[in-house]
Amino acid sequence: MYVLIPVAYQRSARWCCGRPSIVRKRARFLSLTGLVKVIENENLKMKSDSKKFKEEFKKRMYAWVLRLIKFIDDLPHAPSRDVIGKQLLRSGTSILANYVEANSASSRKDFINFFTHSLKSRNESKVWLTLLRDTGERSKEIDWLVQECTEVCNIIAASILTLKGKR
């Protein structure tokens, strides 16, 4: 069990973390003022939530790629749609591949780079999907693919910002 204590200074406050035996006297004093937060087993809960989110996100991306492949297979054959379909297949499948590769990266820098490549591929897929939609291929499936693409782009972009420490 660790105790997080806000240590108030003249104009700023910061959190001090330590073993309970070290901060016991300060904790007794600060607990009277209501400034102490004792966190026990919270880290384990957060880790399991984080792990659960990662697994669900990976499944969500996998399901998106499967639906994308089925969508591309069902496109009517035309020269322009064949080219766009092939580009969409390449960029759409590389999203999942880069995400999986990021999870086995050897360093933090590699991890960020794979996430960045995944985001770039997702943005490229979004461009191809909107081109298909705007050239006359209207369906609920393409609208769902674009919406899901946008949502996942936002999640990946937020993750990159968090990893780089800009958020």
Image (cartoon, grey):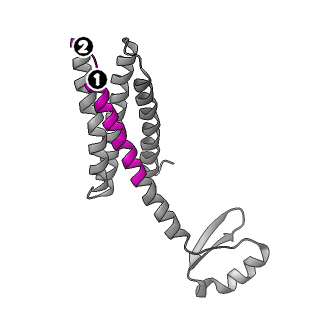
* Position of residue 84 in the picture relative to residue 115 (left or right): left
Q: Which mark is residue 2?
A: none
Say what secondary structure mark 2 lies in.
Answer: helix
Q: Residue at x 39, y 21 (%)?
A: 130
Q: Which residues are magenta?
A: 55-79
Please indicate whether residue 96 sits to the left or right of residue 159 in the image.
left
Tell me if residue 107 comes above or below residue 27 in the rendering: above
Image height of 123 relative to 103, above or below: above
Q: Secondary structure at mark 1?
A: loop
12 relative to 68 in the view: left or right = right
Using the image as rendered, state which of residue 100 and residue 25 is in the foreground. 100
Name the quadrant containing residue 116.
top left
Task: Judge from the rendering whether residue 31 lies leftward or rightward of residue 16; answer left or right.
Answer: right
Determine the main secondary structure of the stretch shown in magenta. helix
Which x, y percent locates residue 98? 28, 44
Q: Which mark is residue 80?
A: 2
Q: Position of residue 43 (x, y in %)?
A: 52, 69
- Residue type highlighted by circle 1: Asp
Instruction: Indicate yes or no whether the magenta region holds residue 64.
Output: yes
CA neighbours of label 2 inside 10 A, class few (<14), some (14 to 19), many (20+): few
> Three-letter amino acid code at disc 2?
Ser
The x and y percentages for residue 3 are: 61, 77
> Mark 2 or 1, which is nearer the eye?
1
**Residue 74: mark in rendering:** 1
Q: Quadrant of the N terminus?
A: bottom right
- Whether 68 is among the magenta residues is yes
Q: Earlier in the sequence, mark 2 or mark 1?
A: 1
Picture quarter containing residue 108? bottom left
Q: Where does the image place residue 73, in percent across and percent down from the top left?
A: 25, 26
Residue at 46% x, 30% y is 147
The residue nearer to you, when weighing 69 against 43, is: 69
